[in-house]
Amino acid sequence: MGLSYVTPVVVNGENVAKLDKKEVDRATEEWQNALIVYVIGQNPSLMAITNYCKSQWAPKVEPKIFKHDEGYFVVKMDTAKDRDAVLYSGPHLFFGKAMIVKQWTSSFSFNQEILKVVPIWVTFPNLPLNCWSTDSLSRIGSTIGVPIYADECTTKQLRISFARILIEMDVTGTIQEEINVEDPNRRVFKQKVGYAWLPPFCAKCQKIGHVCEEKKKPTKGRIIQKWVPVGQAKDISSSNPRQELDEEGAWKLVTRKTKDKEKQGTFQTAKTAVMYELQSGGGSSAAGAGGAKGPNPYLS
Ligand SMILES: [Zn+2]
């Protein structure tokens, strides 16, 4: 398209491009049925998402789909009905991976930041039945975010064991497991809150989708290392070159810090004794290769 020069407005000595409201509104309308789609922990191709949309969502008119460099997609639906059908039918899975689907808004910026606030299906188990009106559910949902939608079973009260609401919430903040509700008689009761799933959030990178392992902090306490079965490993050494061995279902090296000998002693169980044999015997290369350098606290 051909462009032309429009004199900028000068504000505080700086040029400002002042946009025309009509033009922006027109473009906003064009994108109002668009969805932001993001697969957590995966970077699917445009083709994969296109096929997924076709087979899973099957909108009446095929959507236009765009991929952003940061790994998320804009799926431009033809109608609001098609958009909402997808938005309200979650949670969505993409080949077993959780998928965030949220409505595009004019304030949406193509930045990972925005994905901190995502729609999450939230349940309120045993919510008193007189609290299920649109107004009450809106007020209850607003304690943890911006309520968007109540599912069909909640709306029609087809199921009464829990109310289920889609709430756009900041997943990087504190996740509340209980909220306070005050009834018209000023009686305040605690209401439990359940979450269908919550995306992993990395406090270090301030991004969802992964959790960076904590860097070893300098500490006055002693560093304890031990081998544990893969499923039990929590704090896994990043410099462990035994990844292949680990993935075969053997052992991972975990590092723990402890301030007192008492705690250290509790690790010395019959189970760990077997691990020393693995480490010092056949698995001696494992002990020498990774983060297991230095004296073994269990052998002293
Ligand atoms: Zn991180």
Image (tube, rainbow, N blue to C red):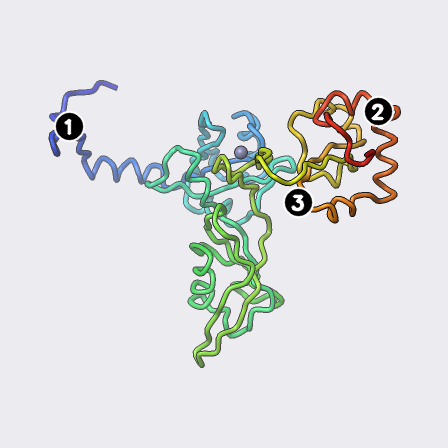
Give residue 105's quadrant in the image.
top left
For marks 2 and 3, the one nearer the N-term is 3
State the mark number for residue 15. Answer: 1
Callout 2 touching callout 3 (CB < 8 Å):
no
Label 2 – label 3 distance at C-alpha: 29 Å
Between 44 and 292, the one nearer to me in the picture: 292
Label 3 – label 1 distance at C-alpha: 59 Å
> Which residue: 81% across, 36% down?
298
Horizontally, is 71 left or right of 229 in the view? left
Does 199 appear above or below 46? Answer: below
Q: Horizontal and vertical percent for residue 38?
A: 51, 36
For marks 3 and 1, the one nearer the N-term is 1
Position of the C terminus by quadrant? top right
- Give the amino acid at mark 1: Asn
Between 60 and 15, the one nearer to me in the picture: 15
Residue bearing the label numbered 3 = 259
Horizontally, is 55 left or right of 114 in the view? right
- Give the amino acid at mark 2: Gly
